Image (cartoon, grey):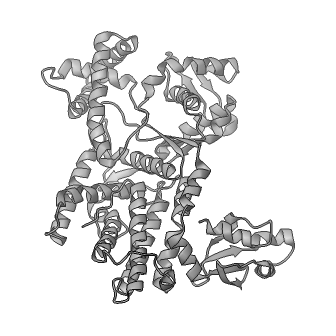
Amino acid sequence: MDYKKKISELIDSPLVTADDIMIAAEGHGDYALPCFKYAKQLRKSPQAIAGEFAASLRCGDLIERTEVAGGYLNFYLSRAAFVREVMLGKGSTDALRAANAGKTVCLDYSSINIAKPFHIGHLMSTAIGGSLYRIYKYLGWNAVGINHLGDWGTQFGKLLAAYERWGDKTKKLTLDDMLSLYVRFTDESERDPDLAEAGRTEFRRIERGEPDAVRTYEMFKATTLEEVDKVYARLGIKFDSYNGEAFYNDKMQPIIDELEEKGLAEVSDGALVVRLDEYGMPPCLIRRSDGASLYATRDLAAAQYRADAYRFDKCLYVVATQQNLHFRQLFKVLELMGRPWAKDLVHVQFGMVSYEGQPLSTRKGHVVFLADVIDNTVKRAREIIEEKNPELADKDAIAEKVGVGAVMFFALGTQRIKDVDFDYEKVLSFEGETAPYLQYTHARCRSVLAKGAGQEEGEPDCSLLTDDESYDVVMQLSRFDETVADAADKYEPSVVARYLIDLAQKYNRFYIAGRIITDDRALTRARLALTRAVADTLKTGLRLLLTEAPDRM
């Protein structure tokens, strides 16, 4: 139920919309309407406007009373009616999904580089994109997950040259082997300038389609995907498309031709560029002086392909903030080309991730493999579980859920634009704002429900859930769908994370305030129903954050 919309409709004024209603400050009701924005138009003080709105309000069963406080009109809901509507109401999520039916969102995320390790630096894009994919799916959108592979460029010529010189052809190549070869090539090319030319020569062989070069290149690609898919499987990540840079090689020329025909592109020092000076940006480089294409050229072709193939309503690029200029240029060029869907392209930026204070560098081999981070987190989770609950069954399976969840929540629990540093002790805390804390609260709920088995049957008496602790939990539950929609609007999974932390804290206060299973059968039934609602919401919310919720911990 959209309570903000319902309240706005009870006010006899066309000026008030659901967006104007906000959650009230603590101690000032449940919802509030700030009236300052209407003062100029109505030529009255905000307080006078709040009073007039209060007088015109059609309270109905939902609102028990109102209060004018300064320029705010505060609403106090009828607790019994509200609790009943939240606990027994059906179809609100269905209505939300129906409103989004037929909408399509493309999400370009993770975008790993072929022949390079899946390291912790890829975590943010993978987690944020994977979470947004699930969030949009929950809201009823058709979501298309795209892994825009970094599978083209001179680095493959360098790797091919390294493999021909130093690779062990007698055994199956691994991602570790490719990293070692690439790092060795980088180091030795600093001493031997001829190696750089050898790398360019080998890449030209790939470009020309020479069978042996292409065969080795395809081996690099297959080996990489085979290994990173193991990580994706642990994270619960799937993609609908793996079309990367190489896929667009034969789709760039029409874009280049159109830019030239429309007079948008010009030659500058032998290179083809689109000037963006009047928009406060440097020129967008379309083709280098040696005729080579660039990221921008392929991204223009990719955007056009996605618009044609998916007819998207939104296309999100989940890429680090360092690429902000690139996407500003890309979107502006598409706008200048007359693409009406350019306005629907969004760069979902995020900050950098470091590992225990250390930056990452693939070129020099200073990398931390994401699989190793997950393995270590799971191992430490297993040790904590052994210490806290040595009799627990399936400790290995539960440690996997706790460890993976800890890593995912680390990436999703704070605002995406912030830089973050991975720290095992913090992400595995059972007391902080972490996945283990939420998972433990969920397990607590399931434990209570198991103990109360057989006492939950029948419709609960919702009037027994109007005390402060119960009501706070119900109010939080009522805002779940609204919160998920807000997360999608802001491209910000941390909004859901913050909601779940608040829900868990409110439930734990309720849990401590009084016994759930009591001698009063009606009270027990009501409190068990509330506990089940919390458990189900935590499980759903954690799933949106790529985290599983074990029933026992």
State the residue at coordinates (85%, 77%): 44
State the residue at coordinates (31%, 10%): 211
Q: Is residue 207 left or right of residue 18?
A: left
318, above or below 516, in the image: above
Residue sitting nearer the eye, 192 or 85: 85
Residue sitting nearer the eye, 472 or 291: 472
245, above or below 421, in the image: above
Q: Examine the rendering and report whether any part of residue 344 can be seen.
A: yes
**How many marks overall?**
0
State the residue at coordinates (37%, 81%): 511
Residue sitting nearer the eye, 440 or 536: 536
Q: Position of residue 333 (x, y in %)?
A: 63, 31
493, above or below 527, in the image: above
Residue sitting nearer the eye, 56 or 362: 56
- The residue lying furthest to the front in this view is 458
Q: Quadrant of the C terminus?
A: bottom left
